[in-house]
Amino acid sequence: MRADRLLYHSLRASHLLWAWALGVLLHYRLRVPLAAPGRNRLPTNAPSVTVVLPVRDEERNVEACVRSLLAQEYPNFRVLVLDDNSGDRTLQIAEAHAAVEGRLGVMRGKSLPEGWVGKSWASHQAAYTARSEWLLFTDADVRLHPEALTETVALALKRRADMLSVVQHLECRTFWEKVLQPAFAAFVLCVRPAFLVNSRRSRVSYATGQFILVRSQAYERSGGYAAVRGDIADDVALARLLKRGGCELLLVNATELVRVRMYYGLGEVWAGWRKSLYAASGSGLPLAAATVLLLNITSVLPPMVLAGRLFGLRGAVVRPAAVSVLLMLAARLSGDRLLRVSPLYGPLQPLAAVIICANYLASTWRHLTGKGQEWKGRTYGRR
């Protein structure tokens, strides 16, 4: 009977957790500031912006990304690509565009110093040469609507923000991308909800590395990427640094302006999230253990109980399990709509949760054992 009570109370706890997730994701959709075409007006004297694009072995992405950056309708910007010692044709592709486009500059990065993460080192080098009022750090897998820069700068000025980051449209094409990417993204968004990120009274901070718009003065005053040089989750670390320094953060819904296909297929999804999930979610073994436990209680346990019902399980646990499953599907649907991905894969949330748990444990294990995190031919944090 004690086991039955434990199961019952676990399912009731899952109601609260899914209600939280559903409320957070609905808040993102309905209350978070919206950056969309034609929505925000830019002042007459638009501040200058340097778009910083660090790249390493991105020949499949760099051309389309550069084209979308150069297509911005913003009146006062330039694009600076810094190649981080690519071993493919990334640098040649970027230089070919720079030869015919005056707003595009290309730099060859220096060798990676000890203690630096590659992306942070590349971003630091490019930002050091920029002479503009704002910096936009972005990634090669990003595609921007022509009004993206205009809308986000206008919104940042309107809200007097020092840093603006976005919730973007998550482009998913393969089966595993559609199952896993929305679940991973929604998990991080629920851990770091926008109403806390955007509040001065909260210490919660967050930014997505695909789009970080920051005032140059605030960036330099905080120490910038040099101050978070060894953090594999550089975007979250930079946001935390700025907020602790008294800067105003603004997380906005820009799914109509910014889209990204982060990873291609299961192998890249696994490696990409394993690299940063431990640091992005909040470091610490107790937190990792609690997170894995809660993911199983919310996403795995309720459908298992309902499956047991089909095989004769009776008692007071069936109804709360059904409620949990309904809340899970409602939250997953809300997250899928926010990220503009297909809702057809929502019922596979239990499978996604199992893989997230495995990925989180792998990320945690590599960190705690000193094996480090691998990315693009480099290993970070190895002891």
Image (cartoon, rainbow, N blue to C red):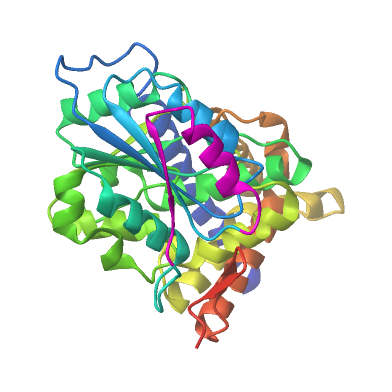
Above or below, 50 relative to 192: above
* Residue 363 placement, left or right of 129: right
In percent of width and height, residue 132 lies at: 21, 38
Residue 146 versus residue 309 in the image, above or below? above
Residue 169, can we see it?
no
Q: Residue at x 44, y 70 (%)?
A: 112
Using residue 8 as the reference point, say whether residue 310 is left or right of it.
right
Q: Is residue 109 magenta?
A: yes
Residue 318, above or below 296: above
Residue 79's image quarter? top left
Which sits in the foreground, 200 or 43? 43
Confirm whether residue 383 shows in the render: yes
Indicate left or right for 297 with 129 as reference. right
Q: Quadrant of the N terminus?
A: bottom right
On the picture, is 101 further left or further right than 51?
right
**Which residue reaches farthest top?**
38
Which residues, given as a range, are shown in magenta?
87-110
Q: Is residue 266 magenta?
A: no
At which x and y percent is residue 68?
A: 50, 27
Identify which residue, 354 or 340, lies in the foreground: 340
